[in-house]
């Protein structure tokens, strides 16, 4: 479970890094009613996403870019943390009307540097990710729109050291993922380094 949680965390971190902009906001949705059924709450969230998308873009075509993590409150009710990308300012009253099931809180994401945005947001989501994996094994750790920008990956194998100037390393960590090969899962040790490239 810990390994799966770490994989979800790092996948999320990379998605945030690829999609973050100056109009990125945190949105939290809670309910008046004590909704403890995850599927019921998830359906309410999907309806809100569709209404929110139409309100902003005036089309039923999915253009809203978002990542969402569901989390249980102490009372047992579900609530949602949503990261919205490229969304203009919307008055709080309108958000309440669009949601229609309880409270709404929205804040602009403010980080000290763009290099730290993925780490900051992922830390905010981390509790919900672990809870989702624990209570809903086999399901996604987070929900996201299909139109998110994905990180480009170049894979190569080498027995030589990968040398680079240490001054361009923004962040580094290590974790263990799973690799499926010949009908079995194997541990795969990962050294994660985020480096700054010249634009």
Image: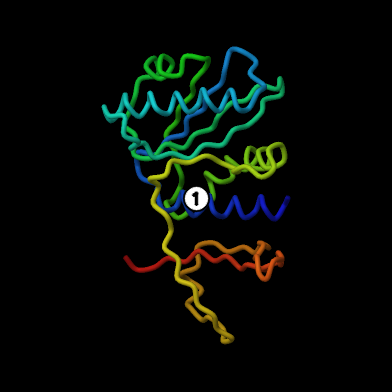
Relative to the observer, which residue lies in front, 94 or 54? 54
In this picture, residue 147 sits left or right of residue 173: left
Residue drawn at the location 42% of the way across and 51% of the way down: 114
Residue drawn at the location 71% of the way across and 67% of the way down: 186
Q: Residues within 10 Å of mark 1 (few under 14, many from 20)?
A: many
Query: In the rendering, at what x and y percent does residue 34 appear?
Result: 65, 15
Query: In the rendering, at what x and y percent does residue 25 appear?
Result: 42, 35
Question: Please, is residue 180 above or below residue 50 in the view?
Answer: below
Q: How many marks?
A: 1
Question: Please, is residue 101 above or below residue 111 in the view?
Answer: above
Residue closest to the far front? 183
Query: In the rendering, at what x and y percent does residue 196 appear?
Result: 42, 65
Quarter of the picture containing the C terminus is: bottom left
Query: In the rendering, at what x and y percent does residue 171 appear?
Result: 54, 61
Helix, strand or loop under label 1: helix
Residue closest to the far bottom? 160
Question: Please, is residue 67 above or below residue 169 in the view?
Answer: above
Residue drawn at the location 30% of the way across and 28% of the way down: 56
In this picture, residue 137 sits left or right of residue 140: right
Residue closest to the far left? 58
Residue drawn at the location 48% of the way across and 78% of the way down: 164
Residue 94 occupies which quadrant of the picture? top left
Location of mark 1 (residue): 118
Judging from the image, the colouring scheme is: rainbow
Residue 191 occupies which quadrant of the picture? bottom right
In this picture, residue 30 sits left or right of residue 148: right
In this picture, residue 195 sits left or right of residue 142: left
């Amino acid at each position: 479970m810990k390994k799966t949680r770490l994989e979800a965390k790092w996948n999320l971190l990379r998605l945030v890094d690829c999609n973050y902009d100056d109009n990125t906001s945190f949105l939290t949705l809670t309910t008046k009613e004590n909704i403890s059924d995850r599927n019921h709450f998830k359906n309410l969230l999907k309806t809100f996403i569709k209404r929110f998308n139409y309100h902003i873009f005036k089309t039923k075509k999915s253009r809203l870019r978002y990542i969402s993590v569901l989390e249980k409150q102490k009372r047992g009710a579900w609530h949602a943390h949503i990261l919205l990308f490229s969304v203009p300012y919307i008055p709080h009253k309108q958000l309440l009307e669009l949601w229609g099931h309880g409270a709404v809180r929205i804040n602009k994401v403010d980080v000290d540097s763009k290099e730290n945005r993925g780490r900051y947001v992922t830390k905010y989501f981390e509790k919900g990710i672990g809870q989702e994996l624990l209570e809903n094994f086999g399901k996604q750790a987070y929900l996201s729109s299909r139109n998110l920008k994905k990180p480009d990956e170049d894979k190569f194998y080498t027995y030589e050291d990968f040398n680079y100037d240490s001054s361009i390393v923004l962040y580094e960590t290590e974790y263990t993922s799973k690799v499926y090969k010949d009908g079995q899962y194997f541990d795969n040790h990962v050294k994660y380094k985020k480096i700054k490239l010249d634009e």
